[in-house]
Image (cartoon, rainbow, N blue to C red):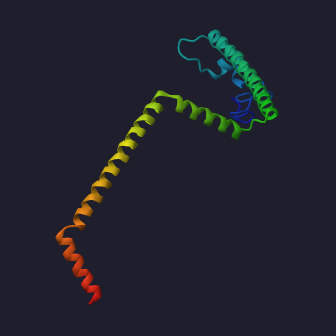
């Protein structure tokens, strides 16, 4: 291959093609290139190699054509999106919104929501019960003789 004239840009429709947009120099030489290079794999005749190189050239030409068609379609798609006012940000927002809606309608989300709801209700009930118990215990403690004695001593300190 002729690396000097070859287009190495991976996004280029001419990737792998020589300076004139034709096939690589290996395929240009045909059988002469094969014979001159003397690099036939074992069990491959010159005729078979020539046929393979010919097929390779056709496939590379088809790839080049497909790249050009794809590029034209991508440009057309971008133009249609521009006319419709669809920016990449708008598309991302739409995708996220649709994804969130899909999550919310999924069975896993519903089950998780129900489980969290029940857990929240049980936690609320537990805190409420705990608060009632603590309130009662503090009231009992306040009415106990020990607390009254302590309260009297603290009161005497303030007065004295």
Residue 155, placed above or below residue 116: below
For the C terminus, which image quadrant? bottom left
Q: Nearer the viewer, residue 58 or 145?
A: 145
**Image-based side of 100 in relation to 140, left or right:** right
Quadrant in which residue 96 is drawn: top right
Residue 75, placed above or below residue 153: above
**Image-based side of 106 in relation to 14, left or right:** left
For the N terminus, which image quadrant? top right
Q: Nearer the viewer, residue 42 or 52?
A: 52
Q: Residue at x 66, y 35 (%)?
A: 94
Residue 129, placed above or below residue 21: below
Q: How many marks do you count on the picture?
A: 0
Q: Position of residue 105 (x, y in %)?
A: 53, 29
**Image-based side of 148 in relation to 52, left or right:** left
Q: Nearer the viewer, residue 56 or 131?
A: 131
Q: Nearer the viewer, residue 134 or 54?
A: 134
Q: Position of residue 108 (x, y in %)?
A: 45, 30
The residue positioned farthest toward the left in the image shown: 145
Q: Residue at x 17, y 71 (%)?
A: 146
Q: Position of residue 83 (x, y in %)?
A: 82, 33
Q: Position of residue 66 (x, y in %)?
A: 73, 21
Quadrant in which residue 102 is drawn: top right
Residue 101, placed above or below residue 146: above
Quadrant in which residue 55 is drawn: top right
């Amino acid at each position: 291959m002729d690396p000097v004239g070859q287009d190495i840009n991976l996004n280029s429709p001419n990737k792998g093609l020589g300076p004139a947009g034709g096939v690589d120099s290996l395929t240009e030489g045909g059988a002469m290139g094969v014979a001159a290079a003397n690099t036939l794999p074992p069990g491959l005749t010159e005729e078979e190699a020539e046929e393979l190189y010919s097929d390779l050239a056709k496939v590379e030409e088809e790839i080049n054509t497909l790249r050009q068609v794809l590029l034209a379609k991508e440009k057309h798609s971008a133009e249609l999106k521009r006319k419709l006012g669809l920016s990449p940000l708008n598309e991302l927002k739409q995708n996220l919104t649709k994804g969130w809606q899909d999550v919310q309608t999924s069975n896993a989300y519903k089950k998780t929501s129900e489980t969290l709801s029940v857990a929240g209700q049980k936690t609320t009930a537990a805190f409420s019960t705990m608060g009632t118990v603590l309130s009662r215990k503090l009231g009992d403690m306040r009415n106990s003789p020990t607390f009254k004695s302590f309260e009297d001593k603290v009161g005497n300190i303030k007065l004295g």
